[in-house]
Amino acid sequence: MPDLDVPDIEPDVDPDRTVDNRGRGCANGIVRVQRALEDLPEGAVLEIHSTDRRAKTEYPKLAAETPHELLAVVERRRRVLRKQYTTYLEIHE
């Protein structure tokens, strides 16, 4: 799969729902994300918090394989050795 162009600037949106996957691997957290995607209407924004560095690749892949639009994956340092990733997806059917 080619490299995906992943925006890294927080979008100016108010999320309609937040899924907190901090402390979970992307594989475990993706089920929670998929449930939220199914429950949200067209145009809603899902915000996903994660501490798994794979968030920078897995959520963009999810967006590329679905009609949902990746708005951004923002990386922040939580502690000296720990980062948090916040992903924003806009829901499309």
Image (cartoon, helix red, strand yellow):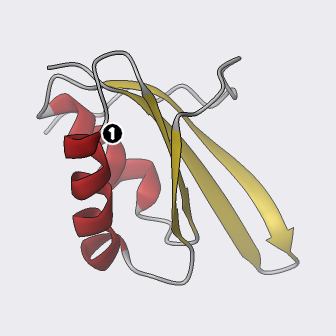
How many numbered marks are there?
Answer: 1
Residue 91, above or below 47: above
Residue 53 in percent (x, y) is at 50, 66
Residue visible at 54% across and 84% down in the picture: 23
Q: Amino acid at mark 1?
A: Pro
Q: Nearer the viewer, residue 3 or 52?
A: 52
Q: Is residue 16 left or right of residue 62?
A: right
Q: Is residue 6 left or right of residue 77?
A: left
Name the quadrant containing residue 33.
Answer: bottom left
Residue that sits furthest to the right in the current view: 80
Residue 89, above or below 43: below
Image quarter where the C terminus lies is top left
SS at mark 1?
helix
Residue 28 in percent (x, y) is at 28, 79
Residue 58, above or below 8: below
Q: Nearer the viewer, residue 45 or 49?
A: 45
Residue 39 in percent (x, y) is at 26, 43
Category of crowding for the residue at label 1, using alpha-carbon neighbours closer than 10 angstroms: few (below 14), some (14–19), many (at least 20): many
Residue visible at 34% across and 47% down in the picture: 59
Q: Nearer the viewer, residue 62 or 13?
A: 13
Task: Provide the residue designation for mark 1.
Answer: 60
Q: Nearer the viewer, residue 28 or 74?
A: 28
Residue visible at 66% across and 26% down in the picture: 14
Name the quadrant containing residue 92.
Answer: top left
Image quarter where the N terminus lies is top left
